Amino acid sequence: MKLAVIGLGNMGTAILKGIREAGIFKAEDIIACDKKFSDPDNKPDEVFRQVRFTDDNRSGVKEADVVLLSVKPQIIEHVLEEISDLSSGKLFISIAAGIKIDYLKQKLGNDAKIIRVMPNTPALINSGAAALSPDSSITSKELKTAKKIFSAVGETAVIEEEYMDAVTGLSGSGPAFIYILIEAMSDAGVLNGLTRETALKLAAQTVKGSAEMVLKTGRHPAELKDMVTSPAGTTIAGLSVLEDRAFRASIIKAVNRAVERSEELGSSD
Ligand SMILES: NC(=O)c1ccc[n+]([C@@H]2O[C@H](COP(=O)([O-])OP(=O)(O)OC[C@H]3O[C@@H](n4cnc5c(N)ncnc54)[C@H](OP(=O)(O)O)[C@@H]3O)[C@@H](O)[C@H]2O)c1
């Protein structure tokens, strides 16, 4: 099976690196397509040794069984029109934010098989969270291939396309909400005399470790919270302030507003 990746920017490069490291496709079965490769000074990274590079999207798609579309949403129409006559029967995996399966089918033709995916930026360090939404013609084998690709750069979940805006608000925008939390916690550490470096390291590791506790133990966050919260102790004193300042409600409202904004952007196309 051969893979073409169209668009080798932040995401395309990170996903391709994950694919190579996990050995999902052999290097010689990958064609990486990006217009930057028309510039002879732009040498591909060593990690992609033996991968073929081209600035010609059509030649990549012609050979491939699976095509990963990782160009910006603003230019995807141009790319789809360029390759549409080559698309019949091939599997297209699109990560373009806000671009719907119906639109991809309309541009590529009904014989193209489509899986729409919403990854997030921690995929750049193999800690991503990606939601996959297959069109109704996708077989379990095709879905398995897509899951393997995104499992190489993090966790995956399969969802109905109607929930893509929910995913965009939660795991797409979510990293920014968590960065604010880490920054605020480290500010509090500095306020109490820690160096910035120490405070930032402790805050980030606390978020990472807590997230891993949820994922690895499978326990409900409320149960894990109770384990840290002793009677009349420090944690309950801090938690009472968070409840007083509506921390939970603020987070719910922030995600909800991001979901609404994603819906607004999708309907203004
Ligand atoms: N970054 C995120 O957090 C994130 C999260 C979820 C989904 N996504 C989606 O992922 C996709 C890629 O995002 P990104 O951040 O990786 O963007 P990016 O860094 O700009 O990468 C896009 C790449 O495509 C290249 N390109 C432009 N026109 C092309 C063409 N006609 N044929 C082939 N390649 C072409 C660009 O080259 P030039 O730079 O030379 O134009 C660039 O290398 C987007 O659709 C975005 O919505 C991103």
Image: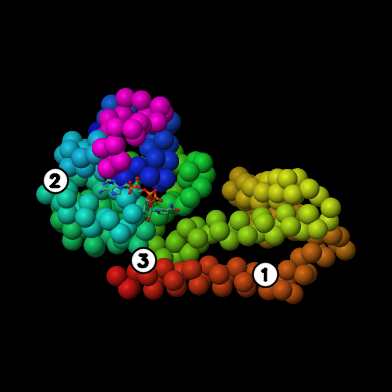
* Number of residues whose C-alpha sits closer than 10 Å to that of mark 2, classed few (under 14), some (14–19) or many (20 or more): some
Q: Which residue is rendered at x = 30% and y = 41% of the image?
A: 36
> Where residue 40 sits in the image (x, y, percent)?
29, 32
Cα distance between the residues tagged 2 and 3? 28 Å
Residue interval drawn in magenta:
30-53
Viewer-nearest of labels 2 and 3? 2
Name the residue nearer the viewer: 88 or 214: 88
- The residue carrying mark 2 is 86
Residue type at mark 1: give it.
Phe
Name the residue nearer the viewer: 98 or 244: 98
- The residue carrying mark 1 is 247
Quadrant (top left/top right/bottom left/bottom right) for the N terminus: top left
Does residue 102 appear to the left or right of 72 in the view shown?
left
> Where residue 43 sits in the image (x, y, percent)?
35, 31
Q: Is mark 2 within 8 Å of ligand 1?
A: no
Instruction: Classify residue 17 by image quadrant.
Output: top left
Residue type at mark 3: give it.
Glu
* Secondary structure category for the residue under label 2: helix
> Where residue 28 sits in the image (x, y, percent)?
28, 26
